[in-house]
Image (spheres, rainbow, N blue to C red):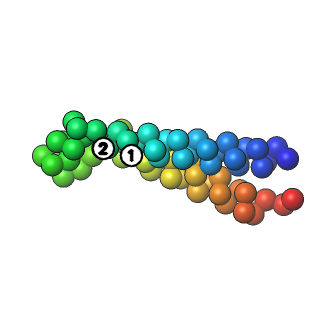
Amino acid sequence: MNKKIMAVVLLVVGIALFVWGYNMSQAAGEQIREAWTGSFSDKATWLMIGGGVLGLVGILQLAFSKK
């Protein structure tokens, strides 16, 4: 039971971090920065990457956990 709870927590935190990073990348300042430099800020990028990884780990734990 504890592994499933941990997997759900990882999934929820991963989704939250990804959404936070995505919202950060859509802000007016980030749009100007992206137009100028061609990329988002490091913080927005790492939030989306970290959220994606945590979400994937949560999904994999839910899919392959025993019982």
The x and y percentages for residue 1 are 85, 47
Quarter of the rendering containing residue 30: top left
User: Badges 1 and 2: C-beta atoms under 8 Å apart?
Assistant: yes
The x and y percentages for residue 37 are 16, 47
Q: Is residue 35 above or below residue 64?
A: above
Secondary structure under tag 2 reads loop
Secondary structure under tag 1 reads helix
The x and y percentages for residue 19 are 46, 44
The residue that appears at 62% across and 54% down in the rendered structure is 57
- Left or right: residue 7 compared with residue 55: right
CA gap between label 1 and label 2 equals 6 Å
Quadrant containing the C terminus is bottom right
Q: Tell which of 53 and 8 is nearer to you.
A: 8
Q: Residues within 10 Å of mark 1 (few under 14, many from 20)?
A: some
At label 1, the amino acid type is Tyr
Name the residue that disc number 1 marks: 22
Residue 46 appearing in the image? no
Name the residue that disc number 2 marks: 26
Residue sitting at the far top: 29
